[in-house]
Image: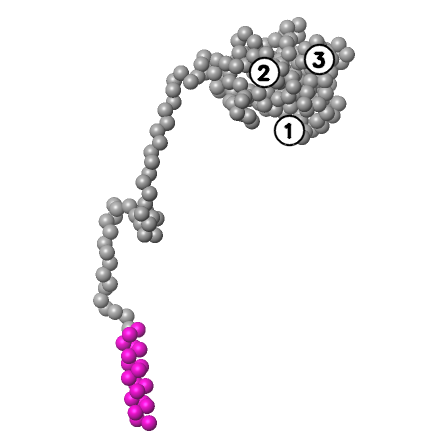
Amino acid sequence: MKKIKLLKLTLLSSVMFLTACSTTEPKVNKVSVNQKISVYNIMGITEPKKEIVHFTIKEDTLNSHEAAVLDDIEFISYQSSRPSYAQFNVNTINEIEWNAKSFLGTPYVWGATGPSTFDCSGFTQWVYRDVGINIPRVSRDQARVGQYVRYENLQRGDMVFFDTKKQRTGIVSHVGIYLGRGNFIHASSSGRKVVIYNFNKQEFYKERFLWGRRLISTNRHYASN
């Protein structure tokens, strides 16, 4: 019995000796405060070399027309083959007309910007943006962009603006795109969809016409405001 007690006492002493806190501070490898330690060093992985890429902007990349409209216009390209400013021509006007007509019958919803529903200015913004021209969101602001055009001087691709309020105020409240021969396409709240009207058959719009704005010209490439 004494031998068993002595054995237990010996084992207990050994455990206490092994688990006791050491009074000696462990040796720690000192690292300079200024030395940067990356995650690669911590993980024991060799840090890959960093490659510095330099970008150079050429001063001649912007022509005079681009510089004049950069504040209001930006390229939003859905295809790599979209035209640059220097390439705006009659083909661009044809593309605007084709894009606009492709949305015929699309429902009108106030505040909608497309492509499944439009309001009037959301429609014009989408059509022009699809050829690389970004115009403001609302009709009143769109009416300040581009070259002022009178009714008798309208050309295909021009934006047409109206005051459609019950009581005339002379303030723009509606916009469409002129297609030539008195026709214009627009997202109509009364028609509840994108439709083509003729000024001579829809005299309400002829009476409420304010002015047009030309964004594209075959001889000036672009008409800035």
| Label annotation for residue 114 | 1
Residue 188 found in image quarter: top right
Label 3 Cα neighbours within 10 Å, binned few <14 / some 14-19 / many ≥20: some
Q: Earlier in the sequence, mark 1 or mark 3?
A: 1
Residue 34, given in percent of the width and then of the height, sits at 25, 45
Label annotation for residue 183? 3
110 in magenta: no
- Residue at the disc numbered 2: 92
Q: In the image, which is nearer the foreground, mark 2 or mark 1?
A: 2
Compared with 30, 51 (above or below) is above
**Residue 55, image x and y in percent?**
37, 27
Residue 62 visible in this rendered orientation of the protein: yes
Q: CA distance from mark 1 to mark 3?
A: 22 Å
- Colouring used for the render: one colour
Q: Earlier in the sequence, mark 2 or mark 3?
A: 2
Image mark for residue 15: none
Q: Nearer the viewer, residue 214 or 61?
A: 61
